[in-house]
Image (tube, helix red, strand yellow):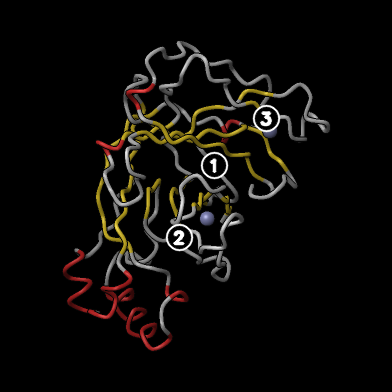
Amino acid sequence: MPRIPRPTREAILAALPELAPHAREAVIFHPERAEPGRRDSSLGGPLLWPRDEPWPVCSLPDENSPDGVPGTAMVPVAQLFRRDAPGPWWPAGIDLLQILWCPNEHWDPPAPQADISPVVEMRWRRAADVTDPLSAPPPPSRYDEDGYLPRACALTAEHVTDFPFREELPAELRPRLAELVRETGDGGDAITRLAGWKLGGWPTWHLTHPAVLACDACGTTMTLLFTVASDDETGVIVGRWGDLRLFTCPADYRHPFQVDLH
Ligand SMILES: [Zn+2]
Ligand SMILES: [Zn+2]
């Protein structure tokens, strides 16, 4: 994926200092086809999974099985070790984030899943707790399309400062942000629309109006944890070459996540 020519954080804030309170750390992951190990950060690679913990299975209805039977094993989407992507999104004591999904299209899955989308699972772990890892997970018994079977990739992590989409900013800032966007990048919005696989940062809302997602457990406004991108390297295609986003509760990482397809 070509990197976006983007001004530095300092240059952006020099041009528009009022953006400073809205800055959020993020890590963009640049995938490259590889054979990562289970102790590596990866997209679509093997997970460091405790042998005695059941592998997630999806039994929701999908295009190939209207009754969701038999349940099909989920597939790894991302495994991220804290050492490779440090940032404020890590709960205390946790150093491993794993994201999986059922590689089938689900038209109307229950909340918090997105419609017409794979069904997502995630785990936060302490890597040291996995003393007896699973050697090979069960393969999915069915899948709709290759776009939901991420090819194993190693990652290069790029730390960036992300800024919110214009409609999430105070109205008086928007014209100046629009001007800054016009003056920078390669014709796209390199300030508030960072493309790619991303941990943390802000969601873009360039296709729909911004949505405020409230935590089902405590009502706190959810924040973006992870963005699954569509790209040639992993072969992942979500939506119409879009993004699938996982939102989590900043008050308690154990509260249920929510998924949005954009
Ligand atoms: Zn499923
Ligand atoms: Zn909550």
Answer yes or no: is residue 41 visible.
yes
Q: Relative to 49, is 89 on the left or the right?
A: left
Q: Can you identify the residue that label 1 sits on?
A: 237
- Label 1 crowd (10 A; few <14 / some 14-19 / many >=20): many
Direction from residue 114 to residue 94 in the image, left or right: left
| Front label number (2 vs 3) | 3
Residue 77 position within the rendered picture, expressed as x and y whole percent measured from the top left:
48, 33
CA distance for labels 2 and 1: 18 Å
Picture quarter containing residue 103? top right
The picture places residue 127, in percent across and down from the top left corner, at 34, 26
Q: Which residue type does callout 2 highlight?
A: Pro
Q: Which mark sits nearer the N-terminus, 2 or 3?
A: 3
Q: Looking at the image, tell me whether mark 2 or mark 1 is earlier in sequence order.
A: 2
Residue 201 bears which disc, if any? none
Mark 1 residue element: loop
Taking the spot 21% from the left edge, 73% from the top edge, the residue there is: 13
Identify whether 211 is placed above or below 112. below
**CA distance for labels 3 and 1:** 20 Å
Task: Identify the element where label 2 is drawn.
Answer: loop
In the depicted structure, whether residue 152 falls above or below residue 222: above
Furthest-bottom residue in view?
Answer: 172
Check disc 3 and report the residue beneath it. Answer: 58
Q: Nearer the viewer, residue 33 or 222?
A: 222
Residue that numbered label 2 is attached to: 203
Relative to 9, is 113 above or below? above
Q: Amino acid at mark 1?
A: Ile
**Helix, strand or loop under label 3:** strand
Does mark 3's beta carbon lie closer than 8 Å to ligand 1?
yes
Is the C terminus in the top left, top right, bottom left or bottom right quadrant? bottom right
Q: Amino acid at mark 3?
A: Cys
